[in-house]
Amino acid sequence: MSKHPTPDTPPEWLGGPFLEEAEYLRKTNEKAWRWEYLGEITGTGGAIFDNVRKERLSLERIRGFERRRNGIDWGWFPDPWRFVRCGWEPAARRLVVFEEHSANKMMPADTGRIVVNALTYADADGEEPYFHDEILWCDDTPDAKVQMGVYRREQGLRARPARKSHMRRLSYEWLAGLREIVIDPERCPLTFAEFTLKEYMRDRDGNWIDEIPDGNDHSIDAVRYAMMEDVLRG
């Protein structure tokens, strides 16, 4: 069934799930709703990610994620080391970013301890925290291979290289094409700022062009690495 029904389409023809999904999108991202369900052309200006929605995330919500994704963008100074954690809800095409960590001028052994602490948590109130052996998808530059080696040897972390070769554009488009990217601006202020401020490039006359600039994208890159296996699956 087309998601662009005519205004006089009887509601009973569309079905309850269709109407519930449409109403949810209308409330959370009206621009996406007008495009997806009404077929309107809704220009996004220069914003790359117009599917970002801010939401205060409860600990209960975070604990409920069945598919967690972790990504690391390596850095020293002035570019930072950045670690993000996400919940992936494929049926809803929703990515939820719920945790971030950032550092400058820290050795791999030190950032590795940050990761270990982040992955050590209780599954429910009243339970003892324990280390969760989750995969870390990382930038795969030559220097990164050394840092991943430290993570594996000294912290026992499952640090793996994200298969990012020639995937920058595709991974940006994949993220921009999700139903929504939910970010808690209090838990992840750096990530929220990067995603909401990232814009296409302009030419010398100030017109938008179809190029994605580098810079101010450390959290974005970490999220891309976290999701790269899902990007490759389509």
Image: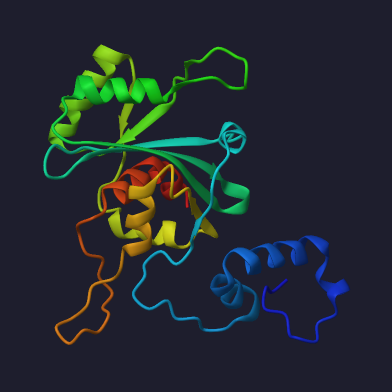
Residue 75 at x, y percent in the picture: 17, 39
Q: Is residue 177 above or below residue 201?
A: above
Quadrant where the image shows the N terminus: bottom right
Image location of residue 26, percent across then percent down: 64, 69
* Residue in the picture at 69% in, 67% down: 22
Tell me what residue is drawn at x 51 percent, y 15 percent. 129
- In the rendered image, the residue lying farthest to the front is 186
Please give the count of numbered marks on the rendered protein.
0
x and y percent of residue 125 in the render?
62, 21
Taking the image as shown, residue 208 lies to the left or right of residue 75, namely: right
Q: Quadrant of residue 103?
A: top left
66 to the left or right of 192? right
Residue nearest the observer in this picture, 54 or 153: 54
Name the spot of residue 153 as percent of width and height, x first.
25, 13
| In this rendering, position of residue 30 left or right of residue 78 | right
Among all residues in the image, which is located at the extreme right? 12
Say how the picture is coloured.
rainbow
User: Which residue occupies 29% across, 46% down?
Assistant: 164
Seen in the picture, residue 21 relative to 227 is either above or below; the reply is below
Q: Vertical placement of 107 versus 83: above or below?
A: above
| Residue at x 31%, y 60% (from the top left corner) | 169
Q: Is residue 75 left or right of residue 47?
A: left
